[in-house]
Amino acid sequence: DIQMTQSPSTLSASVGDRVTITCRASQSVSRLLAWYQQKPGKAPKLLIYKASSLESGAPPRFSGSGSGTEFTLTISSLQPDDFATYYCQQYNSYPWTFGQGAKVEIK
Amino acid sequence: EVQLVESGGGLIQPGGSLRLSCAASGFVVGSNYMAWVRQAPGKGLEWVSILYSDGRTYYADSVKGRFTISRDNSMNTVYLQMNSLRAEDTAVYFCARDRGNGIVGAFDLWGQGTRVTVSS
């Protein structure tokens, strides 16, 4: 199975900060990587697919980059609604796997 | 409105069976790829199963042979039959729709989740 490792696991940031979360795969997943946002008690929400494509309805302050084994999710200017946990997910090969999550907290 | 609504969760003893339902509205489940993803209490997300529009199915190793994904096109509903349940199956189970348009695996529509607790 492909292991997905996110870093940091938790980060503290302020409104307006630029935030970057990294996701590393244990083997290449090409560009078949998605990013989700999840708030407590809610379902995940798709932000990015195919590593860098912004999902319809997702704010343009979210962007993704990378290929192969290293990927990043960037929030250009953190907004109050962005405090949440973010997950990466590879869908290059079965079983599809998620990272352990990165929690963005208020500083 | 386009949405997914799960039901069927509850408290079940180890070794028992449960069937989860995911009722779709606003789109046709038979024309989409539909999946189940679970989240154990306080933990991350775990993909469980996918049902392709052509009927192919895939499962996580942790549930293979115990869980079965299926659909009823007339009810526009997807199911997850869970047998031989274990304590480690305790989780919120989400139904999700693949976003389509090519490569399968990114989920653009999720239900609210249904909680399954396996305990004696």
Image (cartoon, coloured by chain):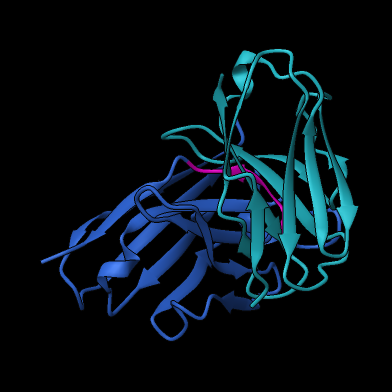
Chain colours: A cyan, B blue
Name the one closer to the observer, A92 or B96. Answer: A92
Q: Quadrant of residue A33?
A: bottom right
Position of residue B34 measured from the top left corner of the image (x, y, whole percent): 61, 59
Query: Looking at this rendering, what residue extends furthest in the left direction?
Result: B120
Residue A43, can we see it?
A: yes
Position of residue A37 measured from the top left corner of the image (x, y, whole percent): 62, 37
Identified at 32% across, 68% down, the residue is: B88
Residue B32 magenta-highlighted: no
In screen coordinates, is B64 left or right of B28? left
Position of residue A63 measured from the top left corner of the image (x, y, whole percent): 84, 35
The answer to whether residue A98 is above or below residue B61 is above
The answer to whether residue B18 is above or below residue B95 is below
Query: Looking at this rendering, what residue extends furthest in the bottom direction?
Result: B65
In screen coordinates, is B106 left or right of A87? right
Position of residue A72 measured from the top left corner of the image (x, y, whole percent): 80, 45
The answer to whether residue B65 is above or below residue A40 is below
Q: Quadrant of residue A106?
A: top right
Residue B74, can we see it?
A: no
Name the one closer to the observer, A84 or B110. Answer: A84
Q: Quadrant of the C terminus of chain B?
A: bottom left
Identified at 71% across, 73% down, the residue is: B54
The answer to whether residue A84 is above or below residue B88 is above
Which portion, as a residue range, is magenta?
B105-111
Q: Quadrant of the N terminus of chain B?
A: top right
In screen coordinates, is B37 left or right of B115? right
Q: Quadrant of residue B12?
A: bottom left
Identified at 45% across, 63% down, the residue is: B79
Identified at 73% across, 13% down, the residue is: A16
Q: How many marks?
A: 0
